Structures are given as structure tokens and as C-alpha cells.
Amino acid sequence: MAEGVEWALHSCLNLSWMDVPVPAARLAAYFDLPAPYLNKQLQALARAGIVASTPGPRGGFRLDRAPAAITLLDVVVAIEGPEPAFRCTEILRGSPFGDPKGNYLDGCVVSAAMSRAELSWRRELAATTVADLAGDVERTYPGSADQSRDWLAAARA
Amino acid sequence: MAEGVEWALHSCLNLSWMDVPVPAARLAAYFDLPAPYLNKQLQALARAGIVASTPGPRGGFRLDRAPAAITLLDVVVAIEGPEPAFRCTEILRGSPFGDPKGNYLDGCVVSAAMSRAELSWRRELAATTVADLAGDVERTYPGSADQSRDWLAAARA
DNA sequence: GCACGGTTACTCGGATAGCGCCTGTCCGAGTCCCGCGGG
DNA sequence: CCCGCGGGACTCGGACAGGCGCTATCCGAGTAACCGTGC
């Protein structure tokens, strides 16, 4: 899986307790990551309607929805694309008994089994929201959210 | 996900109703696939102890375990490797409050959530065996297994 | 008729190129803030 | 003192190289079957 997914998730989590836009460069400095590439990931999140971007001074990115309305699946799909990881190439079409015009997507038992597993994965991701993660952080590491918010906001020197 | 996984699964399924070794070239002809590359995938399955290979004339690949003892997860791991798809890079270590010697794998809520989803995926794959797939095929398309077996065996001209 | 050895052909197995996607980087278009000048 | 305007700097946004893993391919080592020969 693309590494940018991890960056996007952590970025969303940190943005969830910010009330002012944060520049991509600031987030990149926080994680010690290459700024332009993180910017690229944030653009993908913006295209998906997860974050909103405001240009100009004191601009940056902010969440465009409530943290409780952003699931992990939303973020993964925004970065990785909507295509499932296991893509059935309809291998049976080329078999000696294959019909070139037949349907080998729904009827293929291998594809069906893999789709079931992937559906289970997606269901789990869709059941967790950014707000849930934020709650876990506040419960496990009290005060760390405030610490991060202050650091990100203090950059406004 | 690697396309070879699909090939490996279909190969295992077809091997499940064969009682004599089948050469990689014959399986490749059945699916209309490049033979040397399918051979490579079968080698990976052999290293994982899923299939056994016998060289020489009338040689080839056969399942090395009962179909009921081969889960889809076994096949996926054999081809894709044991590494999870989402790999936590411990991004928080580089943060201003990060401790270079701290543990950011178990404590990271993002990593934990992604691992939960991936565990759900693996659990689903581990719950399905090649024998289950074979049963589905026989139930949905009666006689097709015999057809395929005859074709693969007839190659022995 | 039977056993045995050499030959043959067939199989896997690992080492070798090609390509596409993700990673990483750069510069330009747009926008808001700040300071200056005028009323 | 207040308002309007221009310069400047900061931000995103998309276009441009590099590297790694999957895809595809080839040839060599090993082995079992087959056939011919001798007993």
C-alpha cells in the first residue's frame, strides 16, 4: 500500500484539532517529511472533499467536514483510488472452455472469495472515523493533542 | 495487489482435482498465460510448501496438502510475502515531541486501526480453503471440474 | 523373456531485461496581508 | 485620523525526473522414462 496513506491519516488526525488552516509545509515540518510530496497527498484529499484549501498568507488546509463524518475508508480511497486491491482479470475467459462474451467477474468463485475478504476490510475501515482516532489519542495520551495544536499554530511567527 | 495471486489461486483450484502432476506449461496453456512467469509463481508456492514439484518427464506440480488444508491466506502470503499491506513507518518518531527510542508501532492509533482492518481481511481469507472453492465450483457449474481435469490430463499426448 | 545401461527429452530452477507506479522535486498562478499615500 | 490602493510574500496547484517492484523472458541443471543390447 502507498506510504502516502499513512501521511494522509496522520495529517487528518492533526487537522482535526486545529481550527485555523495549516500550511502543508508546516505539517511536513511536524512529521519531518518532504513538503511538496505531502502537499500532493493533501491535494488528493481536497479533490475528495475531505479537506479544504485556502491560498494566500495565513492559508493552508483544514478539514472540510466534521471529524466524525470522515472515515478511514474515505481517506484510503482518496489516496489509493477506488479500485479494489484484488482486480479480477477474468482469467477464465482465455481457457479452452471460456466464452469470450461471458461474464467472468460475478461468476468466478476466486473473485467472489477475494471480494468478500476485501469487503470485510473496507467495512472495518468505514466503521472508524477520524473522531474515533482523536478520542483514542486523547484517552491514551492526555494533553498531547493540545501540545501538537500549539506547535502547529505557533508556526505563525 | 500482484496479479500473480489470481493466477496462483486458479492454479491451486485446478490442481485440487488433479491426481497426477501437471507441468507449468500446461497450466499456462489452459489460462493462455506466459508459461515462464506462471512457473515463477508456482515456484513460490513450492517454497511455501503448498505445492510439490517433480522434475523430469511426466513431472510437474501437484498439491502437497489436502485442499481443505490450504487457505486463501496461505496462497496470498506465499506470493505477496508476509509483510502487511499497510506498513507503519513510525512517522511520529520524527515529530517535535517524538522520542527516537520510543515505540511508535503499538502505541500509534493509526497503525492500530489499520492493523485491525487488515486482520479482518486476513481472517476472512484464512476462513476459506481451496476445498471450499472447489465445492462452490462443483455446485455452481456441475461437471466443469471433470472437463478441466480431462483437458489438463489429455495434454499427455 | 528379462535385466541393465546409455541416450533422450522433458521438467523445474534461478538469473536476466522491460515497464509502470509510487516517491520525490520543481516552478508558476492565485490570493490575501501590509504599508504607504492621499483625503 | 480614516480610506483606498499597490507591492510583496505566501499559499496551493499541476507538470517534471528518479527508483523500486511486478511483469515477462531466457537458458542451464537435474531427473525420469524409453529404447536397444546383452544375457
Image (spheres, coloured by chain):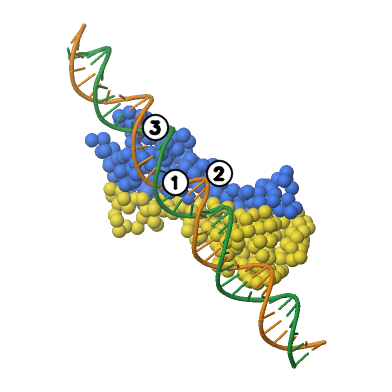
Chain colours: A blue, B yellow, C orange, D green
Near-viewer residue (B135 or A32): A32
Would you say residue A151 is visible in this rendering?
A: yes
Which dot marks residue A83?
2
- Please indicate whether residue B69 sits to the left or right of residue B1 in the image: right
Q: Where is residue A32 in the image (x, y as percent from the top left)?
A: 32, 47
Q: Position of residue A139 (x, y in %)?
A: 37, 49
| Chain containing mark 1 | A
- Which callout, 3 or 1, points at the residue further toward the start of the chain? 1
Q: What element carries label 3?
A: strand
Q: Position of residue A121 (x, y in %)?
A: 54, 50
Could you tell me if the residues under marks 3 and 1 are in contact, i.e. CB atoms within 8 Å?
no
Report crowding for label 1: few under 14, some 14 to 19, many 20 or more residues within 10 A (C-alpha). Answer: some
What residue do we see at 48% from left, 36% from top? A48
Near-viewer residue (A120 or A144): A120
What residue do we see at 34% from left, 46% from top? A33
- Which callout, 3 or 2, points at the residue further toward the start of the chain? 3
What residue do we see at 60% from left, 60% from top? B36
Could you tell me if the residues under marks 1 and 2 are in contact, i.e. CB atoms within 8 Å?
no
